[in-house]
Amino acid sequence: MPAPCQTASLEEGVRQYKAENYEEAIEILLKVRKADPSSSMAAFFLGMAFKQTNDVQNALPQFRDAVMLKPPIREAVVELIDISQQSGNIPEAKQWIGLAERENILPAKVSFLKGMVLAQEGKYGEAIESFEKSKKLDAAYTQAAEFQIALCYMNQRNFSKAKERFQAALTLDPLSDLGSFARRYQEIVEQRSFIERPLRITLGVMGKYDTNMLAEPNLYPGIESLTTGDQASYGMTNTFRLDYVPTLSGNWLFNATYALASGINERNYDTHDVLANTISLAPGYNFGKFALNFPVNYTHTLKRDPGYRRYADNFSAGPMVRYLAAQNHILELFAGYTKKNVFKTVTNPELEDQSSCGVDSYLSWMWLLEGGGIFNLKYGHAIERADGIHYSNQSNRFTVNAIYPIYSALRLQLSGDVNLQNYDNENSFFGNETRRDKIYTGTVGLTWDVHRNVSLIAQYTDIVAHSNIAAYDYDRSIYSAGMELKF
C-alpha cells in the first residue's frame, strides 16, 4: 500500500497534468514511479504527460507498464494502439488492437484506430468498415470517421464517393478543424479527379520558327555547296493525345496511349512535313515500394515526298522497374529491345540503310520537390545495329530536367541533354573516317495554366552538333509558342 506522501504526490502529478502543466507533471510523476514502481496509475499519467510533449519513446514503456501492472489501466491499451499507429509500428498496434477487442475496451475508439491501421496498410475497404462501425458505436466519432472514410475513397481513386464523404464531414461541423480540412480536401478531390480521370484527351497547337530545319552543316571550306539557303522556316506542330488510365482492382497497373502528331513547314514542306501515329501500352504490377511495368511502344511515320509516304516504323518493348527510394525520391530502370524500319530509298543500302535493331536502356532519378517542382537526372545507353554499315552506333546520353513553379500556375522548365554517339564503322564517303558525334541540346520554357483545361506554352531550344565529319556538324535554334487543351 503506498505511503500517504506518495499518494499525495501522485494526486499532485495528476492535477498538474490536468492543468496542462506537463513538464511539472513529468517531474513529479517520475519521482512517484521511482518511489513506487508498482503504481499503474502513475505509469499511465506519466505516459500521458510524455505523449503531450511528443516524447513518444519515453511514453511507450510507461503505457506498457500501465497495462501490465496491477490494477491494469484499460485506457493505456488504447494509447498504445494510438502511439504505435502514429509511429508506423503496425505489428505492435495490431497486437494491442487484438487485446482491446478481446477485453471489449472502448470499442468505438478502438474500432476507429483499427481503421487508421488498416488504412495505413492500404486495406481501404476493411478500413472503411471499421470507421463505419466506430460511428455506429459512438456518434461522437461521426465527423472524424466520415473524414477518414473520404480519405480511403480518395486513395481508392473513387473520387465521387470521396467528395460525398468530405461534404458529410463538412456539414456536421463547418467551423471545426476537421470541417476546414474537409473543405480543403474537397478542392483536392476536384483537382485529382480531373488529373487522374481514366480517359484523358490533350490537344496541342504550337507555332515555331526553326533556324535550320534541314540540319544543314555549318560552313566549312570545301562544303559550302551543301547548303541551300532554305534551312530557316516557320512551321507548326499539332498534336492529339488520348490516354486511358483505368482504376484496376488490387495492385494491377495499366495505361494506354494513342498519339497523333503532325509537323507542317513553310519551306521544304513537300519533303519534310510529317505525320506520326503512336500507340503505347504499359501493363504492370505495384509491389508497394517498387512497381514493375512492361511498356510497349509503336510509332508509324509518314513523310511528304511530295505526297505522304510511309517513312519509318519504330518499335520498342521491355521491362521497367520503378522504385520509391525515399520520400519524394523515385528511381527508374528500363532495358528494352528496339526495332526501326526506315523505308527511304538509297543507292547503296548495304552502306546507307538506316533500318536497325538493338537495345535501349536508361537509369533515372526523380526528386519531387515541394510545391509541385520536379528535378530529374537520367543516363541512357543505346545500341543500334543498322543494316547499312555507316549507321551502326552506340550512344551514351546524359539528361537533366527541372520544372519549378515560379508563381501560382506559372512554371519554369529547364532541360539539358548531351548525346555522345559513336559509330562502329568507317564511312567510305568521307575518307574512311569513323564518325563521332557530340550533340548538345538545351531548352528553356514557360507554362502558364490559365485554366485547368488550358495551358499557354513558350519555349526556346538550342541544338549544337559537333562531329569529326563536317557534313554532320550543325547549329539549330527553335522558337515555339502555343497552347495545350486538356479534357
Image (cartoon, rainbow, N blue to C red):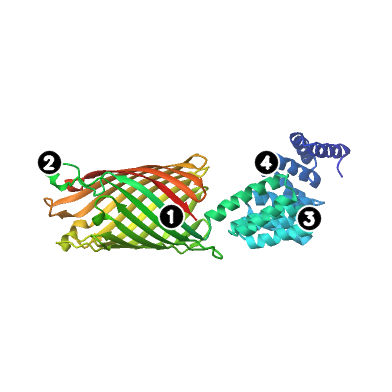
Q: Which image quarter holds the N terminus?
A: top right
Q: Residues within 10 Å of mark 2 (few under 14, many from 20)?
A: few
Res 340 → quadrant: bottom left
- Residue ID for mark 1: 203
Residue at horizontal 22 percent and vertical 53 percent from the top: 423
Q: In the shown orientation, is residue 7 left or right of residue 466?
A: right
Residue at horizontal 56 percent and vertical 65 percent from the top: 249
Q: Which of disc 3 and disc 2 is earlier in sequence? A: 3
Estimate the x, y position of residue 365 in percent, counting from the top left. 43, 49
Q: CA distance from mark 3 to mark 1?
A: 49 Å
Which one is closest to the eye, mark 2 or mark 3?
2
Q: CA distance from mark 3 to mark 4?
A: 31 Å
Q: Which of disc 2 and disc 1 is earlier in sequence? A: 1
Residue, far front: 266
Type of amino acid at the residue the image marks with label 4: Asp
Type of amino acid at the residue the image marks with label 3: Ala
Residue at horizontal 17 percent and vertical 63 percent from the top: 349
Estimate the x, y position of residue 125 in percent, counting from the top left. 64, 62
Q: Residues within 10 Å of mark 4 (few under 14, many from 20)?
A: few
- Residue ID for mark 4: 55
466 or 347, which lies in front? Answer: 347
- Residue ID for mark 3: 139
Q: Is residue 379 above or below residue 54?
A: below
The reply to whether residue 121 is in sight is no
Res 159 → quadrant: bottom right
Q: Residues within 10 Å of mark 1 (few under 14, many from 20)?
A: some
Q: Residues within 10 Å of mark 3 (few under 14, many from 20)?
A: few
Q: Is residue 124 above or below residue 412?
A: below
Q: Are marks 1 and 2 in contact (CB under 8 Å)?
A: no
Residue, far right: 4
Q: CA distance from mark 2 to mark 4?
A: 77 Å
Per the image, label 2 sits on a secondary structure element best described as loop
